[in-house]
Image (spheres, grey):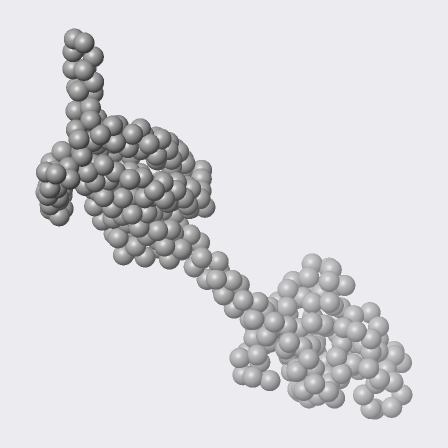
Amino acid sequence: MSESAIKANQHEAHRLYQRGVAAARAGQRRVAAGLLGRSVRLNPDSEDAWLWLSGVVDDPTQQEFCLRTVLKINPENHRAQRGLHQLESRGLTATSGAVPPEPPLPLPKLASREGLERRDSWWVTFRRHRQEMGHARLLIWTFPIMLVCVALLLHESFAFAVARSIAAQAPPATSITQLATRLPTPRPTLVPTLEAEPLAVTEGLSAAYLSALEPIRVGLRTATADYLAATTQISGGSMGAVAANQRLRAAVTEALVALRALQPPLLLQQAHADYLRGLELQRNGLDAILDFYSSYEVAKANQAALSFQEARAYITRAQRGLEDQARHLAALGAVASQTAR
């Protein structure tokens, strides 16, 4: 048995001895016998514990056993000698001078004291292991709770930033204008005069393109509104935000497919290209958000914010070109309606 286990046994044995003495002084002999019996099991060399135990057990055989054990530990113990002499005078001791047979519990067998020490020390090791396991469980539960709290804080702050970036229908004129000026300047395509389309044909193609484009833009506005409504709800949590991002990404991908299928007229080719590039950047930003929710890397959040900002600049320039052409067509229609025929 290890030294730490021996010290623990002795400490526990002394505590049980004190409780047993108190119970004996209070007249609770059965309780005292149980406590003192456990004490001598843990520390069989306790002279006082054996002596007190002899005074609370009722069986003379057990009393003789306890007194003889005291004398075996300390042959000069006068109280044990006197008690054993009283038992002998009353004829309650064994006829032979040998140690009597082992009495019933709670007394141990002194001949196998080392075996008892090994057997009785298991509970000391068990208590120590239980305490260590309790500390380990506390650490195991504390770590994921801290991770969840950090993840929730990151989610709320990042969702708020993304919502503000997407929700802005018209970002500040200065920031978008400055970013738009840094975009590649469209180079006009030179069309030979003989191959140029007639004005009426160009206007008809522009009107048809804008009509085909309008349902795509309406669908994107609806998907963006649904995304904002889902991400601004605190009860949704990370899973709700991920699902909302996936739905918006699917809507952007569907719009890209439909937009690539359109054939823009010459005057709207640059606006068409800007719109495509803006939607591609917006989809890249949504992919970065989904990566962020799976890894919580700050770099993914920064990548998403930059993609959304650049996408907004392209889409703003595309919208400006589309609205200018729509106003031009509306003005031509008004003039045509007022022309005398």
Q: In which quarter of the image is the C terminus?
A: top left
Residue depicted at x 17% and y 28%: 199
Percent coordinates x, y for residue 281 in the rendering: 27, 48
Quadrant in the picture for residue 261: top left
Quadrant in the picture for residue 24: bottom right
Residue depicted at x 38% and y 47%: 152
| Front-most of residues 258 and 52 | 258
Q: Is residue 66 left or right of residue 73?
A: right
Q: In this view, does 72 lie to the left or right of 183?
A: right
Percent coordinates x, y for residue 175 in the rendering: 13, 39
Number of numbered discs: 0
Q: Residue furthest bottom?
A: 97
Q: In which quarter of the image is the N terminus?
A: bottom right
Residue 22, above or below 83 = above
Residue 180, above or below 20 = above
| Front-most of residues 272 and 70 | 272
Percent coordinates x, y for residue 198 in the rendering: 17, 31
Residue 225 visible in the snapshot: no
Residue depicted at x 10% and y 38%: 193
Q: Is residue 136 left or right of residue 194?
A: right
| Front-most of residues 314 and 188 | 188
Quadrant in the picture for residue 177: top left
Residue 27 visible in the snapshot: yes
Q: Which residue lies furthest to the top in this view?
A: 340
Percent coordinates x, y for residue 273 in the rendering: 23, 43
| Front-most of residues 111 and 62 | 111
Q: Is residue 163 left or right of residue 23?
A: left
